[in-house]
Image (cartoon, rainbow, N blue to C red):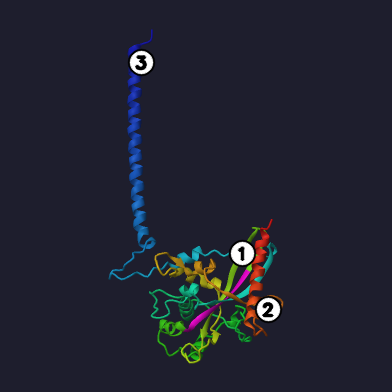
Amino acid sequence: MPDMRKNGELRMTHKKNSHVMKRTRIYFLIAVACFTGLNTLQAQEKLSPDSTQLLFDSRGSFNHIKTNLEDVRAKVIEINPRVDDVVWRKMVLRVIDLRERQNRPLYFPYEDISESSQKNLFSIIFSHVLDGSLTPYKSMSNAEQTFVPPFTPENQLDLEEFLQASSLNSWESIYDMVNYVSPGVVKFYIQEMWYFNKATSMFYNKIMAIAPLYDENYNDKAQGYLRTSVFFWVPFGDLRPFLQEEFIKINGRNTTPLVDFDNFLVSRQFNSYIIKDYDITAQDIDHNIDNPDFIFQEQNRVEGEILDFEQDLWHY
């Protein structure tokens, strides 16, 4: 017969061991939870000053929301397809008229701009040109307004000479110059390329360059018409980190939504019209055309070529 006392002792020993293992497991889970919670609190303490900016500063004024430039540079993604994969492409030059309602977020504010305040598109570009962090270009041989110069060292703009010729060297600070010029910048040129990549079967748009246009008659209201001139050109790829650093107000009723300038431009939330088609002749659309209706028809034709190609890709 089996020894009942011995079997009972074995069961009691097994039960005790089970209780010990359960208690050990519970203590281990509690220790892990405490350790994880401590690390989470430490991580939150480290991240909170940078990840979430307070709405008001120490004086109770509104904080200008701005991101860290180094973090921004790490987020910029540039798509660079292989030449053999691009089976269709078209380059155009567009005009963004800041007087149009849809483009107003790019124009305002146009005065009392400072390093810590809300900025407009021109103030972002010009301030970084003036402090040397963004290189401007202007062709030394081709004075045509709509000509985009090659971004080579020989076409780099002599900043001191430019400031002297524009009578801006009398101002003491960067933002004094920005505020003096900003109201008169009423248009922008953007050079963009549309292309189809057969490797991804996708249609892309890329802004290549941008140029601010200043109205020379801005302070002379008696003239009653625009007379714009290109200040300089900058590569859009070099400008993008600075555009992502600043946020734009896109809704007059609610200014809470945060959209950076880069997203606004890349996602094409602006209104524009084509002024040049880089076809064989690469001439301005209004070249030798005086009739506004004919110019408008030509603009629609070039715009239609882009839209038609994209729609034909998915036509069944």
Pointer 1 residue: 204
Query: Which x, y percent locates residue 174?
Result: 42, 82
Of callouts 3 and 2, which one flags the residue occurring earlier in the amino acid sequence?
A: 3
Q: Which mark identifies residue 282?
A: 2
Callout 2: helix, strand or loop?
loop
Which residue is nearer to you in this view: 72 or 34? 72
Q: CA distance from mark 2 to mark 1?
A: 21 Å
Looking at the rendering, the stretch of residues picked out in magenta corresponds to 184-193
Looking at this view, name the residue that lies furthest to the left: 59
The disc, 3 or 1, on the residue closer to the chain's N-terminal end is: 3
Residues at circles 2 and 1 in contact by the CB criterion of under 8 Å: no
Q: Give the number of the disc on residue 7.
A: 3
Q: Is residue 168 left or right of residue 199?
A: left
Residue 1, position in %: x, y? 38, 7
In the image, is 181 to the left or to the right of 148?
A: left
- The residue that appears at 63% across and 68% down in the rendered structure is 194
Q: Amino acid at mark 2?
A: Ala
